[in-house]
Image (cartoon, rainbow, N blue to C red):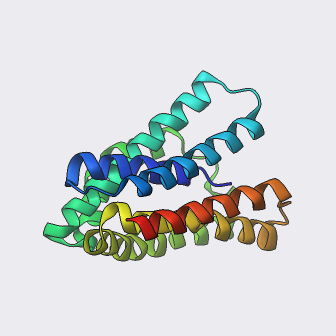
């Protein structure tokens, strides 16, 4: 299962804190059930939690949740494509430094498929995807529309099985179905 589900749950908390959205108590019950399901699955699959790895994951989840909520709030004022453009501009000094420090020793060893994947993520996933994502969040409500991204693990599971030959276990499908029910319940309760 995809851990992006957890970042979505943190986004809802930040949406309530920052944007003034007030979903119903039923919404929160469904959201909590979904979060607990994903957390339990993660614990079952990890079996040996580490402070470093899991701590960094929790920090990333909180940062992503705050970023989604803030981006949605900003997109109400300046538009989705401006939000993602400014985010990329402001992050570029740090990401450029990290790229320089971690660059490969031989650029020729990078496969063309890796460059194509990078271009896809940069243009379609980041720019085009986030334009529509932030617009949807700002128009439909961060908590309400954000729940739809919890369906992303289904697509990830299907693509990983089809394209990469990954094994999709019955537990993954079961957890995905529970999350789907929680998403539908939360969406109806929002």
Residue in view at x 58 percent, y 67 percent: 151
Q: Is residue 129 left or right of residue 168?
A: left
Q: Residue furthest left?
A: 77
Residue in view at x 43 percent, y 74 percent: 129
Q: Tag count in the figure?
A: 0
Between 120 and 97, the residue placed more toward the observer is 120
**Does the image show residue 105?**
no
Horizontal and vertical percent for residue 106? 64, 50
Residue in view at x 68 percent, y 27 percent: 49
Between 93 and 164, the residue placed more toward the observer is 164
Q: Is residue 40 left or right of residue 101?
A: right
Q: Quadrant of the N terminus?
A: bottom right
Q: Is residue 114 left or right of residue 127?
A: right
Horizontal and vertical percent for residue 110? 66, 59
The relative height of residue 14 versus residue 189 in the rendered view (above or below) is above
Horizontal and vertical percent for residue 128? 40, 77
**Does the image show residue 77?**
yes
Q: Residue furthest top?
A: 51
Horizontal and vertical percent for residue 141? 29, 67
Between 123 and 145, the residue placed more toward the observer is 145
Q: Quadrant of the C terminus?
A: bottom left
Residue in view at x 27 percent, y 73 percent: 81
The relative height of residue 85 versus residue 132 in the rendered view (above or below) is above
Q: Residue 188 sits in which quadrant?
A: bottom left
């Amino acid at each position: 299962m995809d851990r992006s589900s957890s970042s979505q749950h943190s986004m809802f908390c930040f949406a309530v804190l920052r944007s003034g959205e007030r979903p119903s108590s039923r919404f929160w019950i469904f959201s909590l059930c979904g979060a607990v399901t994903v957390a339990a699955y993660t614990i079952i699959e990890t079996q040996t939690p580490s402070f470093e790895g899991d701590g960094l994951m929790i920090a990333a989840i909180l940062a992503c949740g705050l970023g989604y909520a803030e981006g949605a709030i900003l997109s109400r004022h300046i538009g989705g494509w401006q939000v993602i453009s400014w985010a990329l501009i402001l992050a570029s000094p740090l990401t450029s430094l990290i790229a320089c420090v971690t660059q490969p020793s031989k650029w020729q060893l990078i496969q063309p498929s890796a460059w194509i994947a990078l271009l896809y993520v940069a243009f379609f996933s980041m720019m085009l995807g986030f334009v529509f994502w932030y617009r949807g969040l700002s128009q439909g409500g961060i908590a309400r529309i954000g729940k739809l991204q919890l369906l992303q693990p289904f697509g990830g599971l299907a693509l990983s099985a089809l394209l990469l030959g990954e094994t999709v276990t019955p537990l993954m499908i079961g957890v995905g179905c529970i999350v789907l029910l929680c998403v539908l319940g939360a969406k109806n309760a929002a």
